[in-house]
Image (spheres, grey):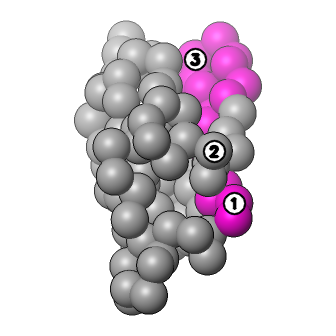
Amino acid sequence: IEGKRSAHICAFARNGEDETVVVAVPRLTHQLYGGDQVPNWEDTELVVPIRGGWQDVFTGREMGGRERIRASELLADFPVSVLIGRSAD
């Protein structure tokens, strides 16, 4: 995790032969809201291994083969994220 609000996400990855699983969970979220309805993640990003594509297990959303995913995008539709990344082959 990189960015100003990186302390507010706990994440880990596990690599297999053909796929990678990344789990990201927000923490200490009250500080992110500041009276708003939407958390302010600022420039916080999840840095992930480059894969052929990422899919969120809970939302089904595809995120392409990126190396960085903004926290605001990752956690926009569901409060936690489990990503499955498959090799480009």
Q: Do tag 1 and tag 2 residues touch (Cβ < 8 Å)?
A: yes
As drawn, 9 above or below 45: below
- Residue visible at 69% across and 64% down in the picture: 28
Q: Please name the residue that numbered disc 3 is placed on.
A: 18
The numbered dot on residue 7 is: 2
Callout 3: SS: loop
Q: Earlier in the sequence, mark 2 or mark 3?
A: 2
Q: Position of residue 83 (x, y in %)?
A: 54, 44
Q: Quadrant of the N terminus?
A: top right
Q: Do tag 3 and tag 1 residues touch (Cβ < 8 Å)?
A: no
Callout 1: SS: loop
**On the picture, is 21 further left or further right than 14?**
left
Mark 1: few/some/many CA within 10 Å (<14, 14-19, 20+) = few
Say which amino acid is labelled 2: Ala
**On the picture, is 89 further left or further right than 86?**
left
The numbered dot on residue 77 is: none
Callout 2: SS: helix
Say which amino acid is labelled 1: Arg
Q: Quadrant of the C terminus?
A: top left
Q: Position of residue 41 (x, y in %)?
A: 40, 57
- Residue visible at 38% across and 85% down in the picture: 36
Real-space CA distance between mark 3 and mark 1, rounded to the nearest whole angstrom? 30 Å
Mark 3: few/some/many CA within 10 Å (<14, 14-19, 20+) = few
Q: Position of residue 54 (x, y in %)?
A: 41, 38
Q: Position of residue 14 (x, y in %)?
A: 72, 25
Say which amino acid is labelled 3: Asp
Q: Please name the residue that numbered disc 1 is placed on.
A: 27
Q: Earlier in the sequence, mark 3 or mark 1?
A: 3
Dominant secondary structure, magenta: strand
Q: Which residues make up the magenta segment?
A: 13-28
